[in-house]
Amino acid sequence: MSTLPFTKMQAQGNDFIVLNGLTSELPALTEAFVRRITERRYGIGCDQLLVLEKSDKADAAMRIFNNDGSQAANCGNGLRCVGHLLIQQLGKECVSIALADRNVNAEATINGICVDMGAATVTDSSSAHVDIHIGNEHRVFFETTEAFPSDRNVEIVTGQIASHVYIDIIERGAGHTLACGTGACATAAAIWSNEGEVRPLTIEMPGGTVTISGCPKNIKLEGPVSQTFEGVFSL
Ligand SMILES: N[C@@H](CCC[C@H](N)C(=O)O)C(=O)O
């Protein structure tokens, strides 16, 4: 039986398996394989599988798979976790990570890891919600008077006190999660759009807190991450 090395990481309880294709040979990333390794009882278990590959335009390319087997275009918490791993492995202060539609930079700060997420764009809105594109798609609800869509990530604003914003999350492809990095960015971008003012916000999620700063053209996502364990998966 062959084995596959993996690293388990988390950011505010949003948990990831990282497979490093820069240092090990990977199996075919079929939907069946993704569902098996991400399953919490028969596999290792996680919200998202992150796969690192070689890139000619960044320190590494990152592919993202939800635990239902679907692929995703962005993952803010995953970028912070992989940023932390690459900073340690490469001994650099700042690392670059390539996604399908953008390159992001990650650096270590006093508060954990900060990632320059690139642009977050408002694509639609109603009195109840604002839609945001940040590589992947989000609908941020300020009132729950409309049905939740299943084709995008959903953030529900449950309270706001000054610059502290409380949200719940239902992720496309992973269901309820304790935190979502792109969801935190989308929430800030939706609030900036509604208020007509750009200011740093603290986003409080069920699993922990992140800070959002920068501006809609380049949102910064910052907060702690940790490596929880390393192991080998039996193929
Ligand atoms: N947890 C992530 C988002 C992961 C992908 C998302 N479920 C999608 O399908 O777009 C984050 O931290 O951003």
Image (cartoon, rainbow, N blue to C red):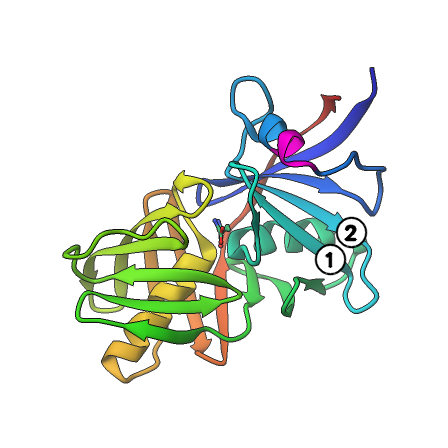
Q: In this view, which residue lies farthest toward the bottom?
A: 196
Label located before the other in sequence (2 or 1): 2
Three-letter code, disc 1: Ala
Residue 8 is inside the magenta segment: no
Q: Which residue is nearer to you in this view: 192 or 38?
A: 38
* Residue at point 77%, 66% (across, down): 58
- Name the foreground residue: 184 vs 65: 65
What kind of residue is marked 2? Glu
Q: Quadrant of residue 114?
A: bottom right
Left or right: 24, with 102 as reference point: right
Number of marks drawn: 2
Identify residue for label 1.
Answer: 61
Indicate whether 83 appears above or below 2. Answer: below
Q: Which residue is mark 2?
A: 53
In the rendered structure, the answer to whether residue 132 lies left or right of residue 42 reads left
Q: Which secondary structure lies at badge 1? A: strand
Magenta stretch in the rendered image: 30-34
Asked whether residue 45 is in view, the answer is: yes
Within 10 Å of disc 2 (Cα), the crowding (few <14, some 14-19, many 20+) is: some
Q: In terms of secondary structure, where does tag 2 sit? A: strand
The answer to which image quadrant residue 87 occupies is bottom right
Q: Is residue 201 visible?
A: no
| Residue 209 point in image, percent of width and height | 38, 53
